[in-house]
Amino acid sequence: ERERENEEEKDVKEKKRKKKKKEKEKEKEKKKKKKKKKKKKEKEKEKERKRKRKRKKIGKKERVTLAQGINVHLGTEMMVWFLFFLFCDSFQKWMKFQRDFENFKTACIPWEMKIKEIESHFGSSVASYFIFLRWMYGINMILFGLTFGLVMVPEALMGKPYGSLPRKTVPRAEEATAMNFATLWDFSGFAQYSVLFYGYYNNQRTIGWLKFRMPLSYFLVGVGSIGYSFMIVTRTMAKNANDDGGGDDTSFNFSWKMFTSWDYLIGNPETADNKFASITTSFKEAIVEEQESRKEENIHLTRFLRVLANFLALCTLAGSGYLIFFVVRRSQQFALEGLENYGWWERNEVNTVMSLLGMFCPTLFDVISSLENYHPRIALRWQLGRIFALFLGNLYTFIIALMDEINLKLEEEKIVKYNMTIWEASLYNGTIPENSTAPPIQVDPADVPRGPCWETMVGQEFVRLTVSDMMTTYITILIGDFLRAVFVRFFNYCWCWDLEYGFPSYSEFDISGNVLGLIFNQGMIWMGSFYAPCLPAINVFRLHTSMYLQCWAVMCCNVPQERVFKASRSNNFYMAMLLFILFLSTLPAVYTIVSIPPSFDCGPFSGKTRMFEVISETLEHDFPSWFGKVFGYASNPGLILPFILLMVLSIYYLNATSKSYKEANLELKKKLQSQAEENKRRNKQKAQKSNEQEENPFETEPPPAKPKGDKQDESTANKGKNWFECLVMGNSCVCDPRLPHCLDCFLCSNHPHNAESQVLAYFLRWLV
Amino acid sequence: MPSEQAGFFVKRKISHKIQLYNVYSSTYSLLRDQNTLLHGRYHEMAPNVVPMDYTKDPDVKLPMQLIINMPELKENPFKERIVESFSEDGEGSLSFNDFVDMFSVLSEMAPRELKAIYAFKIYDFNTDNFICKADLEKTLNKLTREELTAEEITLVCEKVIEEADMDGDGKLGFADFENMISKAPDFLRYYF
């Protein structure tokens, strides 16, 4: 039992020891952990200390760099200010450069100097003709570019050469005379069988390695030229309508002309001469305007006279119209019966009647217009309108003659086609039985019988007309103006009466005749360029030479009119006539394209039933199939009619809105005018009152500009503001609203005008 | 917008440009250089009379005839009036200071009001501080080289007085002139 107790005690003791050991171990572990934690903390603390030390070290570095930085910044600031001053100076130079560049750009406009010289001597109405001529030249250049680049050059470079096809060769019968000057001048012979005319072009669908689609290009160029012309004429009319709308301030018209028209920079005697002439012309124009506005009109008498004049003019026009119609019908009858039976008069009846009408009717209209007593500008318009109506008769005869010729040629073509089969059969001479195919016999292209190519004939007519028109104009200028001036000048010494003041005297520049000539000539070009691609080129040459010749002739042989009047700011009247002629010229071309079958053996559309079939052919071959379907749906009348209706409605709407804008514009103008008049009246009354109250003799020094009554409050309210504030407020200087701004920096004259202010002005305005 | 016919002559400035010196200059003081240029021009008109050294401020005046023949003024119809209005004695002889004054007023940098004052002086032929009808007639004759008839001249002068005369005394005082010229778009372009 004691042993058991001892063993138990031992066990207990052992257990206790073990426990203690464990506890000790635990404690040791805890201690170790604590030590570790402490170590960690110590380490962390040390690290922090180190960091702090490091931070303190960086701080110093930063200071150093800061100091360096400041030095750098100061340096850059200095640089910035230096550059700023440099910039100011170069900014001034930049403004000067811009001004010089503007001058240079104006000097680049062709013929600008010539036209300005003419304007200064003859007035703005004569100059408006030359400006119109220059504008036409621009259009013709574009048309020339289109026809030359897209029609003539591809065929010349990539098409088959001369002599390879019957249509490209001079026929055997004409070969002998083909190179004569007379034939070439008449545009037959080699000129006819070349890229200049419709007949030369081959109807191959694509030519060359580029696969250039010649017929399509020909058709599209024709349509595109007309479309471009419509677009540009309408656009110019719209632009001019804008210019016309804004009138300028005419409250000090004469005063400004007197005090501000001389250019103090002129140092060249020629320029001075031009400037004197220009000032005199400008005064004369303004005087005419003033006299017209002062004219006292007896309204009833003038109205009666104007109605009478219009009635007379209508009678003349109707008479000449009937005469033209009658003469054309007679000539058609003569042609049916064969021209050989009749003498010279019957053959040339139409031409002589037209020339006689063209010579005498304008003078008749001139006499009639003296009844009307209009302002010269309006009288010119009436004159232009009446002569235009007269020349339309001219156009009518020409087109009728052409249509007759075309019908003749079409008849001839049927006969030739019939004869062709006979001729082909005769080639084989019965060597093979009928109705069998045989290899084609090589025939020289010159020997193949030709159909009469009506398109080339039409093109030739237009070209001949243009050339003869050109020659007539030049010869008229040389004889009518130049020789007449020489005669008057040199024979005046040995003549009974004074040639310079009486008959014939020097000629005046005939504005209406020249303008109408230009317009009708352009109408011919538009009509004919589809059939003769060379026509725009000829016209470019004609306009170029005409410009130089007429500028010289005007300055050398003509005298300015008695009453020089200012042309209307826009050329809209000329544009309206041009638009009308353009519309008229498209009609024949469209008619021939749509309804007359093309010739079977010449031109790019030979073989087709109608010329516009080239479009459907292109759609088939060159576009994906769905395109053709879409087009087919789009050309459905059910779609086109609503589209037309929509366009009509939008035109009506736009017309209505533009009318309302114009009315609002007019009302605002009236308000401005009435306000200006009221101000004037008020000023005069106040001045009269102050004159009555005190009569101070005027002092030797002119007084500083005092603000007038109403605006006194505004100017005092704004005094004291600096120019910086003025700039930020808006465009003009707010300090003195009466003073307009300097043209460069938009500051009024109260503020310094140095380069810095200019630069800052631009910069601030850009910011604000 | 400046009138169309006169605009061309502004463009001609390239080929016939006269160097008018900007005395009211920019940030750099080019005054000394420009002054030297002007002095050179003044000197070359009469090298015997004008000294090169102006520090002692000599009292030298050049007569009107010499100054009128300067290329800048030769074609100007108002050249006599310009020289007279800048000369101190009113007879047209300019000292160097007057010379510099003239070019500074005609330069680009002169403020509009100053130009208006001198323009008024130039157009006032009888120096009575009013532009009366006789002055207007003389101006018009000089401008058109006497190509207008007497009726036209009277018409124009009447219209000018009607437009610009605010106080109703039949002639233009400086206030009227200034009021009219301040609204003119061409004034700064041509009165250079």
Image (cartoon, coloured by chain):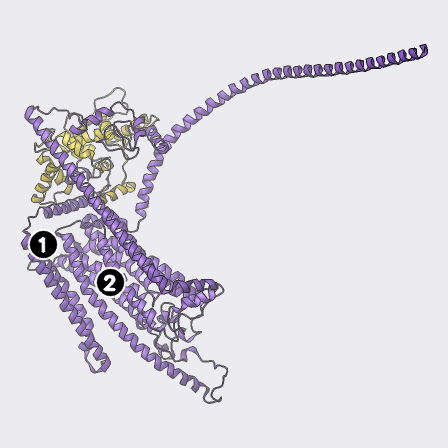
According to the picture, the residue beneath numbered tag 2 turns out to be: A520
Shown in purple, the chain is A
Residue that sits furthest to the front in the current view: A1
Q: Which residue is mark 1?
A: A373
Q: Which marked residue is nearer to the observer: mark 1 or mark 2?
A: 1
Give the SS element for disc 1: loop
Secondary structure beneath label 2: helix
Front in this rendered view, residue B69 or A429: A429
- x then y, percent, for residue A629: 44, 64
Labelled disc at residue A433? none
A638 vs B44, nearest the viewer:
A638
Query: Is residue A433 depicted above or below A311 in this figure?
Result: below
Q: Position of residue A353 (x, y in %)?
A: 17, 71
Q: Amino acid at mark 1?
A: Asn
Examine the rendering and report whether any part of residue B64 can be seen.
Answer: no
- Image quadrant occupied by the C terminus of chain A: top left
Image spot of residue A136 (x, y percent): 28, 56
Between the residue at mark 1 and the residue at mark 2, the CA separation in whole angstroms equals 28 Å
